[in-house]
Image (tube, rainbow, N blue to C red):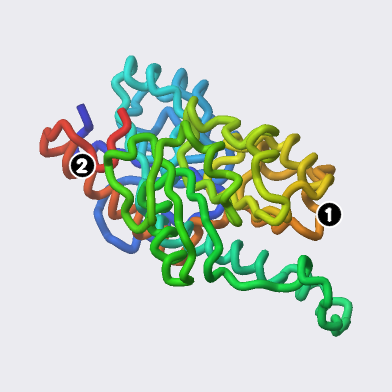
């Protein structure tokens, strides 16, 4: 049972987001505090009835979270939360699915455009004050997205939004989802994720927009990469562990695929020793696909909605996980 408003304490835990500042601007009268690092969170989690957190969460914190009743995840991914343990402790969990679907889809589109138009190379040349000559080799020249085939793995809110954007560029879109019966949305066709390798040889771009599950962990492995065309690009705005990173590095070194746009990696931050940093045909962004200037306020809207539901005694949360 959630404490009454006068007795409730909310903890906002994030290294950068301005959740506490934006929350105070709402003048809710609710007690809250913020922490900026895992050590501080471990020290103070015992004060919290409600925790707003994502990447800073560790399941061992549960032993110290004696008052905790509800976790609002800042992100859509919830693989970091031990759901069985939360359920056993009576801690509710909701995620932020949909909060950044437009932003992530736009980021995936931006990565595709950047790779196709060779923008990372252009930026590097700008830094060197080098005006590159036109390219005679057709296989190395900039190209356009029109008529290219995009395979989207995960046709949820983000994947379907990406499909809509891709159709505006006159691309052919093949969507893969756990249950094709749900519908194809903006894709030209939709199939089960299990038949992925049948469609990889058709793809000019393969984009991951799926959650991390047992089915999607390591989904893009060495075999999948071998099935892709040498001219194809991989774009990952899902989770790093959806891709076998070692196999990807090897495929990129051997030029078995044309390149990759990566917003997520197996371990974050990406190790300084990773070969991915120095590959000219790879564009790495630091897990920023979902970042927007209005992110905090949307999260707080989700939080307010779920607090209201809990105080009213409703059993279902918005974006309920546990």
Q: Is the residue 42 above or below the residue 62 in the image?
A: below
Q: Height in image: 261 above or below 59?
A: below
**Mark identifier at residue 278:** 1
Residue 292 visible in the shown view: yes
* Residue under the point 45% across and 36% down: 193
Q: Position of residue 239 (x, y in %)?
A: 55, 41
Q: Where is residue 244 shown, x and y percent of the image?
A: 67, 34
Quarter where residue 136 is shown: bottom right
Q: Position of residue 223 (x, y in %)?
A: 67, 32
For numbered disc 1, what is the local secondary structure? helix
Front-most of residues 104 and 202: 202
- The answer to whether the residue labelled 2 contacts the one labelled 1, judged by CB atoms less than 8 Å apart, is no
State the residue at coordinates (46%, 46%): 34
Camera-nearest residue between 293 and 216: 216
Evaluate whether residue 44 shows in this view. no
Residue 197, x across and y down, in percent: 56, 37
Q: Which residue is mark 2?
A: 5
Tag 2's secondary structure?
A: helix
Separation of residues labelled 2 and 1 (CA atoms): 52 Å
> What residue is at 42 percent from the left and 52 percent from the top?
159
> Residue, x 60% and y 31% (percent of image)?
218
Crowding near the residue tagged with mark 2, few <14, some 14–19, many ≥20 C-alpha atoms within 10 Å: few
Of mark 2 and mark 1, the one earlier in the sequence is 2
Q: Quadrant of the N terminus?
A: top left
Classify residue 126 as left or right of residue 112: right
| Residue 160 position by quadrant | bottom left
Q: Nearer the viewer, residue 173 or 81?
A: 173
């Amino acid at each position: 049972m959630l404490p009454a408003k006068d007795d409730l304490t909310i903890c906002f835990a994030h290294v950068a987001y301005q959740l506490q500042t934006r929350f105070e601007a709402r003048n809710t009268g609710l007690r809250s505090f913020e922490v900026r690092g895992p050590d501080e969170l471990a020290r103070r989690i015992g004060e919290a009835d409600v925790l707003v957190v994502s990447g800073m969460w560790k399941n061992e914190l549960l032993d110290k979270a004696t008052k905790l009743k509800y976790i609002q995840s800042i992100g859509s991914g919830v693989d970091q939360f031990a759901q069985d343990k939360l359920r056993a402790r009576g801690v509710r969990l909701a995620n932020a699915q949909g909060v950044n679907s437009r932003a992530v889809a736009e980021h995936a589109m931006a990565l595709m455009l950047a790779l196709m138009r060779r923008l990372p190379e252009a930026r590097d040349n700008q830094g060197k004050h080098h005006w590159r000559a036109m390219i005679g080799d057709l296989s190395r020249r900039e190209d356009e997205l029109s008529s290219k085939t995009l395979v989207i793995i995960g046709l949820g809110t983000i994947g379907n939004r990406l499909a809509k954007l891709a159709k505006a560029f006159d691309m052919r879109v093949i969507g893969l989802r756990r249950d094709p019966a749900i519908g194809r949305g903006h894709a030209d066709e939709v199939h089960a994720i299990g038949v992925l390798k049948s469609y990889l040889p058709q793809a000019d771009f393969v984009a991951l927009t799926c959650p991390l599950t047992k089915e999607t962990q390591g989904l893009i492995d060495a075999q999948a990469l071998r099935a892709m065309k040498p001219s194809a690009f991989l774009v990952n705005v899902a989770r790093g562990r959806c891709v076998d990173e070692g196999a990807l590095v090897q495929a990129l070194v051997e030029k078995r695929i044309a390149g990759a746009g990566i917003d997520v990696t197996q371990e974050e931050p990406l190790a300084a020793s990773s070969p991915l940093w120095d590959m000219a045909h790879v564009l790495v962004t630091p897990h920023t696909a979902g970042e927007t200037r209005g992110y905090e306020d949307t999260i707080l809207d989700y939080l307010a909605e779920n607090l209201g539901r809990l105080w009213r005694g409703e059993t279902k949360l918005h974006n309920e996980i546990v």
